[in-house]
Image (spheres, grey):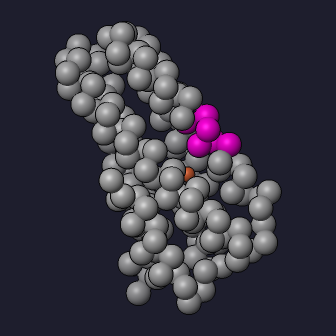
Amino acid sequence: MPSALFDHYLMADHRACDHLLGSLRRHAVGKDWPAAQAAFASLQHDVLAHFAAEEEVMFPAFEAASGMTCGPTAVMRMEHAEARELLDDLAAATQAQDTDGVRGHAEALLILLQQHNMKEENILYPAAISAAGPTAAELTAQIVLRREAK
Ligand SMILES: [Fe+2]
Ligand SMILES: [Fe+2]
């Protein structure tokens, strides 16, 4: 049952994070700072939990199964680090109620995540599912558990 595997779950998460980023930008432009703060808090939590599920569960499983430790997962980890820096910039701009800062950093994060997510969705997720073979369903359960951990 391929539709129950982690690629669909993580792809839906990508879309949900894009949506939160759009909400943050809209609230900042409308100067609704309590709503912007709430959108940022959700965005930060969800992006960091998504990265943790990938870095702590999915990437190690792919690296172990494929023997590739300096290939695509190394690039993905580097891009996660860049995204974390942009989240820090967004936190500061939101805190300072700096509309232009939020718009600029949100745009940069959106572009980074769109390119990053496309590589995961088109290349890494299919490769990781293929590498996992019969353990793909079990790996999916572990990824969901980490992503939804409190
Ligand atoms: Fe990622
Ligand atoms: Fe991802």
Looking at the image, which is closer to me, 136 or 60?
Answer: 60
Image x and y of residue 40, in percent = 33, 31
Magenta stretch: includes residue 100: no
In this view, 102 is above or below 48: above
Identify the image quadrant of residue 98: top left
Looking at the image, which is closer to me, 143 or 133?
Answer: 143
Is any part of residue 103 visible from this angle?
no
Name the magenta segment's main secondary structure: helix
Looking at the image, which is closer to me, 42 or 113?
Answer: 42
Tell me what residue is drawn at x 66 percent, y 70 percent: 62
In this view, 42 is above or below 87: below
Q: How many marks?
A: 0
Identify the image quadrant of residue 115: top right
In this view, 34 is above or below 129: above
Tell me where the magenta segment starts and ends, as one range. Answer: 78-83
- Residue lying at the far bottom in this picture: please name it: 134
Tell me what residue is drawn at x 39 percent, y 66 percent: 145
Tell me what residue is drawn at x 55 percent, y 85 percent: 135
Image x and y of residue 140, in percent = 46, 74
Tell me what residue is drawn at x 52 percent, y 42 percent: 113
Is any part of residue 97 visible from this angle?
yes
Q: Quadrant of the N terminus?
A: bottom left
Identify the image quadrant of residue 100: top left
Image x and y of residue 66, in percent = 74, 74
Residue 32 located left or right of residue 1:
left
Magenta stretch: includes residue 82: yes
